[in-house]
Amino acid sequence: MYSSDCNLILTGFMGTGKTTIGKCVAQKLKRLFVDTDDQVMQLAGKSIPTIFAQEGELSFREYEAKVCQALESSRNLVIATGGGTLLNPQNRARLQRNGIIINLMAHPKVIQSRLAHTQNRPLWNQDWQSLLQQRMPFYQSFSNQLDTSLVLPQEAADQMIRIYQMQTT
């Protein structure tokens, strides 16, 4: 059982709605919303595509680890993580200490339609379907799962809040 001030952490593959739904949840719970990708960009002083292009993915993952370390002792936040942030066991442990993690998933065709015109996701431009398959066992390892394929963000936010409240009351 978690305390009522613990963080609500959203993870999942890109295009599953972590940022959009996370903002809805934060508004409904009257909490601060934090997107780890935004925090990485602020820390690095450059965009994620620029980090990937100039420094590489490994450097990007190091920025993510610093962000997770900074968030480790936080409370009362709604945190949207990048799709690969919690692949790092230390990042997962740091955020899980004070938070409930909910994995968002969506059908691959839904993900593709949501991200069809995206330009700012370096890993999308690679073979995203293989990346999704590779990460699927990891995403499925979370006990809290929410399929966002057929629901509006507000509905998904309500479902997420119910999951959260069941574990904090």
Image (tube, rainbow, N blue to C red):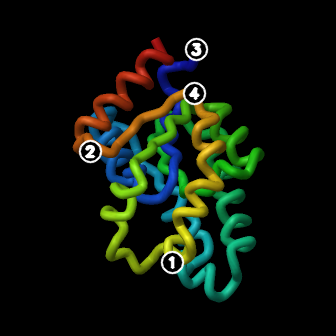
Q: Is residue 154 above or below residue 159?
A: below
The residue that mark 2 highlights is 153
Whole-number angstrom distance, CA of label 4 to CA of label 2: 21 Å
Q: Is residue 74 shown left or right of residue 169?
A: right
Eye-nearest disc, 4 or 2:
4
Query: Which quarter of the image is occupied by the N terminus?
Result: top right
Sequence-wise, which precedes: disc 4 or disc 2?
A: 4
Whole-number angstrom distance, CA of label 1 to CA of label 4: 30 Å
The residue that mark 4 highlights is 143
Whole-number angstrom distance, CA of label 4 to CA of label 3: 14 Å
- Labelled pair 2, 3 in contact (Cβ < 8 Å): no
The residue that mark 1 highlights is 125
Dot 4 crowding, Cα within 10 Å, few <14, some 14–19, many 20+ = few
Eye-nearest disc, 1 or 3:
1
Q: Quadrant of residue 147?
A: top left
**Tag 3's secondary structure?**
loop
Q: 30 or 38, which lies in front?
A: 38
Mark 1: amino acid: Asn
Q: 50 or 83, which lies in front?
A: 83
Instruction: Name the residue: 42% across, 55% down.
Output: 108
The residue that mark 3 highlights is 1
Instruction: Name the residue: 57% across, 32% down.
Output: 99
Dot 2 crowding, Cα within 10 Å, few <14, some 14–19, many 20+ = some
Eye-nearest disc, 2 or 3:
2
Q: Residue furthest bottom?
A: 54
Q: Is residue 153 shown left or right of residue 136?
A: left
